Image: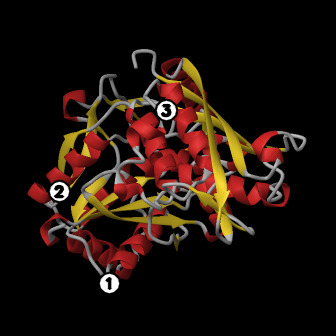
Amino acid sequence: MAKTDRSAVIIVAAGRGLRAGAGGPKQYRTIAGRPVIARALEPFCIHARISTIQPVVNPDDIAMFNGAVQGLRFQSPVPGGATRQASVRAGLEALASDPPDIVLIHDAARAFVTGALISRAIDAAKITGAAIPAVAVTDTIKAVNAAGHIVATPDRATLRIAQTPQAFHFETILEAHRRAARDGRDDFTDDAAIAEWAGLTVATFEGDVANMKLTNPEDFQREEARLAASLGDVRTGTGYDVHAFGDGDHVMLCGVRVPFSRGFLAHSDGDVGLHALVDALLGALADGDIGSHFPPSDPKWKGAASDQFLKYAIERVTQRGGRVAHLDVTMVCEAPKIGPLRDVMRARIAEITGLPVSRISVKATTSERLGFTGRQEGIAAIGSATIRLPWDN
């Protein structure tokens, strides 16, 4: 990536979200089974023009953060401050040793940012140096005094609702934040306000009405209902894989290297558990099977790690606008023993897919010493996947 194209994003996730009601910080609550912060992070993780993702979190929340964002790429989070402004400055300072050209600053509570909005933010900042997404006001706005009496009716044609990600030339907004800190100013509610105070001209670009901030309990209820309605096409798929034993000292099962007296005879690493899940996901999509996407005749897959096959299948679901609801795999073997490694395997699948561990099941059974698995000649695996797609997909 050329130096002039380097863009980073700071994800501000250190707040407590008290207005959202009981249930802990709102960024770690789920909507349609997925943490808000994971939804906010993912579009930046997969955007081709974002080189660095810097989360800022409350140090007390680090365990929740790690559990919520498994499988996503980002720099190690830095601790936030007592205010949003202090948290943003912490993120900026974390990027200062290897500064990007453009920095986007995004609130983790805005879980529905799109790739198109991210691109508009980068483009606007490259042109203007400081720009924010904005949505026109459609209701009449009233200014009131302390008694609640109307004192003015602003012209709504001049009003806009500010959103994030707000985008800036990095060095410019970093210096504005440093200056505000030196002057003891800690009362700014967004980064555009700091830029204005520092004397910058802040432009606006087209926002997105769906890019709303989750603030109150009603916001969560509304978005749960919206997503449930939009992903109403529930599908299931099954997969089956088998590999014979050969020479070796370990087998790969569900992404975990398991010490064993044998190895697998396979073109790739022979991970029957992951292969079965890949076929289950592709089956739910009616999108062929693992052999059609990764043909064993292609030498580049010789000895390949199967986690990349599973990541690919997950991406196929995401590209269709869908979400994976549940994965289940059963391995049929006499040995090695799966039970002691079951939770390790679930955690590894969660890491590969970005799903919560609670949506992943790993089981094992024997074939009562019948057949090739009973004779300990190999291992079989049966996978099942449940996904949700938009109705028009």
Question: 187 or 302, which is in the foreground?
Answer: 302
Q: Tell me whether circle 2 and circle 1 mark residues in contact (CB < 8 Å).
A: no
What residue is rendered at 68% in x and 72% in y?
Answer: 249
Asked which quadrant contains residue 69, the reply is: bottom right
Label disc, if present, on residue 385 of the rendered structure:
none
Q: Percent x, y for residue 15?
A: 56, 58
The label nearer to you, 3 versus 2, is: 3
Instruction: Give the amino acid at mark 2.
Output: Ala
Whether residue 190 is visible to the viewer of this picture, yes or no, is no
Find disc 1 in the rendering and name its residue: 97
The label nearer to you, 2 versus 1, is: 1
The mark nearer the N terminus, 2 or 1, is 1
Q: Residue furthest left?
A: 127
What residue is rendered at 69% in x and 49% in y?
Answer: 357
Quarter placement of the N terminus: bottom left
Label disc, if present, on residue 125 of the rendered structure:
2
Instruction: Give the amino acid at mark 1.
Output: Ser
What residue is rendered at 47% in x and 34% in y?
Answer: 289
Whether residue 6 is visible to the viewer of this picture, yes or no, is yes
The answer to whether 213 is drawn above or below residue 86 in the figure is: above
The mark nearer the N terminus, 1 or 3, is 1
| Spatial CA span between label 1 and label 3 | 43 Å
Q: Residues within 10 Å of mark 1 (few under 14, many from 20)?
A: few
The answer to whether 204 is drawn above or below residue 261 in the figure is: above
Asked which quadrant contains residue 270, the reply is: bottom right
Q: Tell me whether circle 3 and circle 2 mark residues in contact (CB < 8 Å).
A: no
Secondary structure beneath disc 3?
helix
Label disc, if present, on residue 282 of the rendered structure:
3
Quarter placement of the C terminus: top left
